[in-house]
């Protein structure tokens, strides 16, 4: 699918018929969402641009993430998609050519839908493809910030669970591990955008009057990186606290078994002595010998128990 946005006076309009691409004046944004080979070729021929292959878009080398060619800025960045089913990253390719923005992506994205909504609310701020690109990046960063706030709330909820509730240990570990993973992915995508935008900022083809806006976006990304670092520290603290609680519980269990074992050692010794098959053991032939052995066993257990209580070991 290809969506074409152009400016008609003060209004941004949309055209879905790709055959009108060469006839539309004041073109500002062409969004290719999972396009067919024919649609991609049509856009390339009509607009004199060239899209990278999917393999080139996902490359991590700096030469693949950002480069300039024939007064055209090419940039690739990873966006994070967070849904109920899970989360994943997807690559987005940007081409800025003659103040027209071209985006290439696979699948749907809430970031792009939100960008279109913002554009409809304030179309006066869109003068060309550069403004669309800045608005799209701002929307993405706002989404990442919202995701980090959500993670922070989840961390606070886990912290309360550890202190007030007895949750399943496996469930807590899974939650902490999941939050660590998504925070790491947010950090990776933020660093990726930071690297790409730093390259764009140095570009001679990017308008000078928009570079200050780009610097503000980079500052926002730096704030996100600091926020992710803070969340990592909180998660690490929670994980250490959780492991400390588990170790404490295990120590309590081991302590109980140790105390029980020691308490029953003297009675076991006494029972062993009286159970020996010797004729001259005192009280062996007496009718009260059995009760004496029981009394000695109970007394020895109580003495050990009293000693532990005195030492405040139990």
Image (cartoon, rainbow, N blue to C red):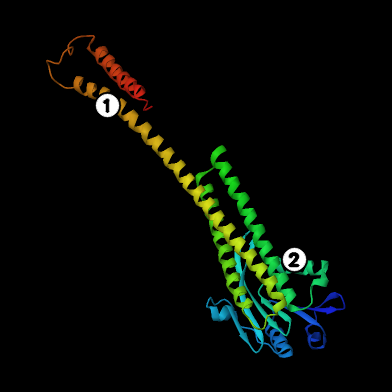
Q: Residue at x 28, y 16 (%)?
A: 294
Q: Residues within 10 Å of mark 1 (few under 14, many from 20)?
A: some
Determine which residue is flagged by label 2. 114
Q: Circle 1 is placed at which residue position?
A: 265
- Rendering coords of residue 112 (x, y %): 72, 69
Horizontal and vertical percent for residue 146? 67, 58
Q: Tell me if 166 is positioned left or right of 114 in this view.
A: left
- Residue at screen point 83% across, 78% down: 7
Name the residue nearer the viewer: 49 or 54.
Answer: 49
Instruction: Work out whether residue 166 can be spotted.
Output: no
Residue 291 shown left or right of residue 199 in the figure = left
Chain-order first, disc 1 or disc 2: 2
Q: In the figure, 5 relative to 165: above or below? A: below
Q: Secondary structure at mark 2?
A: helix
Give the quarter of the image for residue 81: bottom right
Give the image location of residue 153, x and y in percent.
63, 49
Of residues 153 and 32, the one drawn nearer to the viewer in this rendering? 153
- Residue 278 seen from this side: yes
Quarter of the image that includes the C terminus: top left
Q: Position of residue 139 (x, y in %)?
A: 71, 66
Task: Verify CB contact (< 8 Å) between mark 1 and mark 2.
Answer: no
Q: CA distance from mark 1 to mark 2?
A: 73 Å
Residue lying at the far right of the rendered structure: 9
Q: Is residue 309 left or right of residue 165?
A: left
Viewer-nearest residue: 251 or 204: 204
Residue 110 falls in image quadrant: bottom right
């Amino acid at each position: 699918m290809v969506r074409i946005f152009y400016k008609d006076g003060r209004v941004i309009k949309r055209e879905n018929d790709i055959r009108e691409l060469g006839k539309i004046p004041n073109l500002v944004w062409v969004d290719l969402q999972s396009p067919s080979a024919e649609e991609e070729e049509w856009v390339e021929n009509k607009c004199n641009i060239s899209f990278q292959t999917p393999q080139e878009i996902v490359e991590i080398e700096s030469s693949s993430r950002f480069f300039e060619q024939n007064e055209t800025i090419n940039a690739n960045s990873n966006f994070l998609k967070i849904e109920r089913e899970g989360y994943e990253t997807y690559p987005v390719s940007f081409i800025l050519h003659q103040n027209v923005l071209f985006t290439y992506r696979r699948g749907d994205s809430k970031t792009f839908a939100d960008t279109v909504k913002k554009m409809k609310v304030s179309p006066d701020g869109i003068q060309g493809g550069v403004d669309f690109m800045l608005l799209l990046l701002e929307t993405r960063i706002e989404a990442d910030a919202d995701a980090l706030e959500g993670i922070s709330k989840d961390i606070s909820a886990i912290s309360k669970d550890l202190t007030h509730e007895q949750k399943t240990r496996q469930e807590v570990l899974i939650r902490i591990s999941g939050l660590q993973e998504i925070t790491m992915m947010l950090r990776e995508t933020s660093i990726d955008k930071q690297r790409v935008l730093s390259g764009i900022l140095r570009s001679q083809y990017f308008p000078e009057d928009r570079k200050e806006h780009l610097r503000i976006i980079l500052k926002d990304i730096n704030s996100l990186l600091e926020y992710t670092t803070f969340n990592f520290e909180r998660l690490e603290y929670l994980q250490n606290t959780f492991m400390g609680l588990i170790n404490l519980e295990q120590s309590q269990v081991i302590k109980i078994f140790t105390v029980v074992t020691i308490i029953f050692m003297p009675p076991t010794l006494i029972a062993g002595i009286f159970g020996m098959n010797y004729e001259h053991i005192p009280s062996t032939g007496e009718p009260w010998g059995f009760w004496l052995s029981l009394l000695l066993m109970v007394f020895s257990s109580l003495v050990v128990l009293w000693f532990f209580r005195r030492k405040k070991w139990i």
